[in-house]
Amino acid sequence: MVNMFGYEISAGWRDNIGPKFSYSFTPFFTWSDNKNILIDVASGNKGGPLDLTGKSSDAGTYGWKSLGIIRTQDQATAIINQRAQAAGGVNKVLIFNTPVQPGMINYQDVNGDGVIDNNDQQYLNKKQSNHYSMGLNWSVSYAGLSLNVIMGMSWGGVATVDGLVPGNNNASSGYSITDNRPIYWKDHWTPSNLGAHYPNPYFVSDYKVTTDFWLVSGRTFNITNATLSYTLPTGWTKKAGISSTRFYVVATNPVQFINPFPNHYRDFSTGLYTYPTLRTITAGLNVGF
């Protein structure tokens, strides 16, 4: 049983300035969320952070808090020495069952046992999805020339950088250095690139987890449709036996003002390894008799 709630506020205005110029705009704002009243919860999760009874089903992203990339052997040694006593020895200081090494992502040891594992997960943000949205439909016209625009934005959540492993991976043979990866992986850690933005691709078990290291802002702001048209004066067209003539150009998905993904390897509308959402421009002519 889930209680859904939210609200929407909208308004509209249309006016003329003189005999030829007119304009209109219709802004709106929405917010939505929910509250779990009665839900199925695994017995091992009851009373814990994954028990969302009495809470929103979007409690945020649950995973590991990143402390950044381990860039040098000195940094790796310092982490090992810091956690050795809690782990029971330097050889037991692990990150997802892998000894601490340069090029790996380090994570917050939430329970202080010197080992990074499932017990160190926590909520990384307040909301995972965008719960707020705002839009504006507006138009202006002068004589026979008019412009209509539909635009909107949403915010409050996060988006995840994908492509952590090659999309054409064969599970039986593992990952290959020749497999396709997003362009951002070009700046990965190597002994000669200590300041890289991304970890060593070799340590898959270290970075292929839910972590804020791969989270970016989910805020969107775009124009979804814009139509520019011109209608010839009827005094001109009637002479040719035509009641109306209208030229128009329509742009679909023309502008995305925000793209938080590294190197813009994708956008919000198109997932990785999928056919992209197209930006189209269409021109046409309407003639009425």
Image: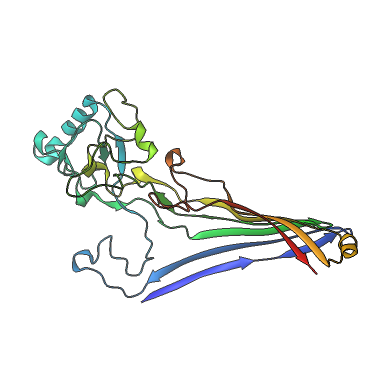
In the image: residue 106, left or right of residue 94: right
Q: In the displayed structure, would residue 119 be above or below residue 186?
A: below
Give the residue at x 86% y 60%.
Answer: 233
Position of the N terminus, as image quadrant, is bottom left
Position of the C terminus, as image quadrant, is bottom right
Kindly indicate the quadrant of the structure image that contains residue 224. Answer: bottom right
Give the residue at x 40% y 70%.
Answer: 35
Kindly indicate the quadrant of the structure image that contains residue 27. Answer: bottom right
Q: Nearer the viewer, residue 265 or 249?
A: 249
Pick out the residue farthest to the front.
Answer: 240
Residue 209: where, in percent of width, then height? Answer: 27, 48
Residue 197 visible in this rendered orientation of the protein: no
Residue 253: where, in percent of width, then height? Answer: 57, 53
In the image: residue 259, left or right of residue 162: right
In the image: residue 87, left or right of residue 139: left
Residue 286: where, in percent of width, then height? Answer: 74, 63
Q: In the displayed structure, would residue 14 be above or below residue 115?
A: below
